[in-house]
Amino acid sequence: MRPAYPPIVFLTLQCAANGIRRKGNKVAIKDGLERMATAFKDEQTSGHTPVQSDAVVVRFAGDSGDGMQLTGGQFTLSSALAGNDFATFPDFPAEIRAPIGTLFGVSAFQINFGSSAIDTAGDQPDVLIAMNPAALKTNVGSLREGGLIIADTGEFNQRNLDKAKYTTNPFEDGSLAKWQVLAFDISALTLEAVKPFGMGNKDALRCKNMWTLGLALWMFDRDRQPIIDWLNAKFAKNQVLADANIAALNAGHAYGETAELAGPLKQYHVDAAPAPAGLYRTVTGAESISYGLVAGAQLAGLKMFFGGYPITPASAILHHLSRLKEYGITTFQAEDEIAAICSAIGASYAGQLGVTSSSGPGIALKGEAMGLAIMTELPLVIVNSQRGGPSTGLPTKTEQSDLYQAVYGRNGDAPMPVIAARSPVDCFDCAVEAVRIAVEYMTPVMLLTDGYIANAAEPWLVPDLEEYTPFPVEFLESVPEDGFKPYSRDHKLKRPWVKPGTPGLLHRIGGIEKEVDTGHINYAPANHQAMTDIRSAKVNNVADSIPDQIVEQGAAGAKLAVVGWGSTYGPIKQAVRRKRAEGVDVAHVHIRHIWPMPKNMAELLKSFDKIIVPEMNTGQLKTILRDQFLVDAQPVNKVSGQPFTIAEIEAAIGSAL
Amino acid sequence: MNDMTPVKATTPKDWETDQEVRWCPGCGDYAILKAVQRTMPEIGGTPENTVFISGIGCSSRFPYYMETYGFHTIHGRAPAVATGVKLANPDLDVWIITGDGDALSIGGNHTMHLLRRNLDCQIMLFNNEIYGLTKGQYSPTSRVGTNSPSTPYGSVDRPATPCAFALGSGARFVARGFDVSKNLPEVLNAAHAHRGAAFIEIFQNCIVYNKDVFEDFAAPKGADGHQLWLRNGEPMLFGSEKSGGTKGIALDNVGLTLKVVDVVDGDWQRAGVIVHDVTNRSLAHMLVEMPFGEFPMALGVLYDDPRPTFNDAVIAQNESASAGKAPDLGKLLAKGQTWTVAEGHPEI
């Protein structure tokens, strides 16, 4: 397990305090030591007292088989238990087990945690933990100058260097000069730690991620016990595996403690972030949407039917709901995307809350059926966890490029309410809102989220369900005094919902144009005009039931408004906060109700001198704002499959003014 | 099918809507509609518990003419909509109305999976071997050489055999009839009595675009020599003195194929005529593939061997997975990786 390359700047660690020479702990330190001072702002030099830090960004990167998502997830738990605010960004390849050591097989998990409000996963990591050359190569570029690289030299052999397309060893060629490097043989140390358990080499090396996690827990002054408990629970059926992983975790932690005295490794402490009192949990967007749909169905007094078809990154919603049968939920894995939505429409027709979910390509397939739900005026929630497109695009990368598809992407004049969640936590309320609109207006509703929100986790003050106002559905169950007409309307233009099985209210519905009131087939010109107008007016009426658009920061009339939607919320919020702190007159408007928009939107947007719209697409909300309000909204676009950084938005604000 | 106690006995008239029927005069669909309206009182159906769900095509207008609940959906997707309806309310008696293009071309996938899953419903596939509503293009069941607007030099692809497709997809009930047959209600009765997906192919005469393509066996003249009406437990006999003698279907023990045999003096046993067993799947495979011409057209219930239904299985699992669990969303949200921030902690 010795490094296969000639180590040129290997310093054998001397414990300066007691002069004890320890074997095996070799630290390769490049000539970046002098930059240590910039590693974290609150640098201090004394021995064992942890360095205080406001916020730290750590990125775990390794092969897709190295368990980086698991490591990141457990580190997230530890951050939560330490009371830090945080945001995570799992960034993994589309391939399940890409060839080991390849650049495209790198899986990474980034977490930003801090003692004040954290809204993004962080622009640039402060610490990069790279488990192999490919992980180093693909991730080091984003590391902050002066940041710390922790790398496993056990994996930096010629074969892996070749796979990562390194022609020279990065530890030797000076290419890492602007960072601090702590490179040592984590593989060998792990093998040594788990030796007593008699595992084969392959299995023993699987404990590497826990060794690394142990080191990270030490670095950030974290309690190991919750992770030990978790390992004991996870490997309850195989105590040897549990013990080996715990031994690796402890060894990594002990390494930190002993290696601290020389080299760039330091212990940091991040205080708990201010937060309202209460019970918290971590939640991902996919979990939050699932729970929100359950809550929505309960508030509506309905059973839920979820028709889904596996697709990245939307499948997690199907998985979560499949385990919640006792909540009156039927989940159906359909034969394709079309059957998934059509079965949900069938269930809505029969009196349940029909829900379907997918990502861009699947949403495209569902388009015709959405038209059917619009024409038959049945409630339906369609969740789109957006990913990079077009076509198959970038299945595991995030994008906001389905806004046109959501608002305009159907044949005919087919208006449909669209709402967008801004964060994992926000998904809960958005899902409740989508259900409310669907049943109160008898319409399909599209709920937009994206791959970033779906997978990212953040702390969530567990909501009190008593605070949500129920919106119970009333089915029509008998003939009204003035007779039964399936397409009669209430003041909101909603038609009655009649369940098959109800005596006396037999009727037929379908995708052919309906006659006003009666719902009979009718192709007459005046009737089609009337029905098109009614469908449009009904969806516009949703605006009567939604709150006015608020300004997140700043106020109406500011020199510049940054108008966003969806998962750009975090970076926009932080960028606007920073710019306002500099005295810039900039406001942040973040739109949840995309269609229809809040009634005050025109007036609000026209109050700003300038408007920029940062989006992870080529300018789709910008188009809608221009179209709806004739305002000079200017696009700020990024379509790299990665979220905006705060710095990018700050720069956009700077150049707009 | 479903245990329904009719409030009062219905008559065929009770199943007619006030809507003007818009099929071409002389279309076979009229006869099928009448047969269904005759069948519903016989099976003791109640209109409010009955749902007709269709796709797109001439046949799919059917629900508008039935005084029941009805859903005219989109092209090919009726089986998917029906699946949601039945899972949401298994007490409903679900009938799917579809055609050869709707069920086997654009909706082939859904048809296959509905049959595989065995959703408790009836699927009536009106097979006229043509696209009628789009003005006469050849369909997936059109015979090779069919001249149509899209195949002016004749179609070149081989047709699908709907009943073979159904069996191959795992169907547990397969039957055949034709529009003007007096036996159609009997076939529909049997389909309804089958708990599970009951697939019925109904040959239907499109008098405008594919007139009389089934005349060879459907015409009253010579019918007994061209139609083999299958009945469980009865020998497979057809023909009469008038049509050139009584014949039967027997097994060629050497080639393991079916063959037509003459029955002399009514002694069908001596001729080796097979007694129809609706639960014999191998026999069903041979019957659906029996080429017309050399053989008569196999009609009636070809196969009927129920298996547990999809809807029953889903509901049973929903119940067993829920047993002993009190749904409490508040508690659910408070599970997992949780921690408590105490009062007095700095607020944001």
Image (tube, coloured by chain):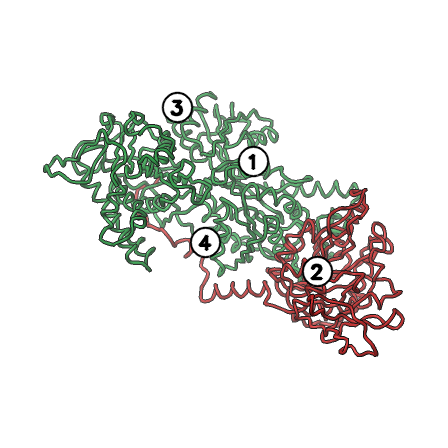
Whether callout 3 and callout 1 share a subunit is answered yes
Is A97 displayed left or right of B220 in the figure?
left
Q: Chain of mark 2?
A: B
Query: What hue does chain B carry in this figure?
Result: red
Which element carries disc 4, helix, strand or loop?
helix
Query: Closer to the observer: label 3 or label 1?
Result: 1
Q: Residue A184: percent from the left, percent from the top?
A: 25, 37
Q: Which residue is tagged 2?
A: B163
Per the model, the C-alpha gap separating discs 2 and 3 is: 76 Å
**Secondary structure under the numbered disc 2 in the rendered image:** helix
Q: Which of the 4 image quarters holds residue B324? A: bottom left
Figure colour of chain A: green
Circle 4 residue: A466
Name the mark on residue A528.
none
| Residue A422 or residue A586, whichever sits in front | A422
The chain under label 3 reads: A
Q: Which residue has dot 3 on it?
A: A583
Work out how far the residue at label 2 is from the one at label 1, CA to CA, in angstroms: 40 Å
Residue under disc 2 on the same chain as residue under disc 4: no
User: Where's residue A53, x and y in %?
Assistant: 27, 35
Q: CA distance from mark 3 to mark 4?
A: 41 Å
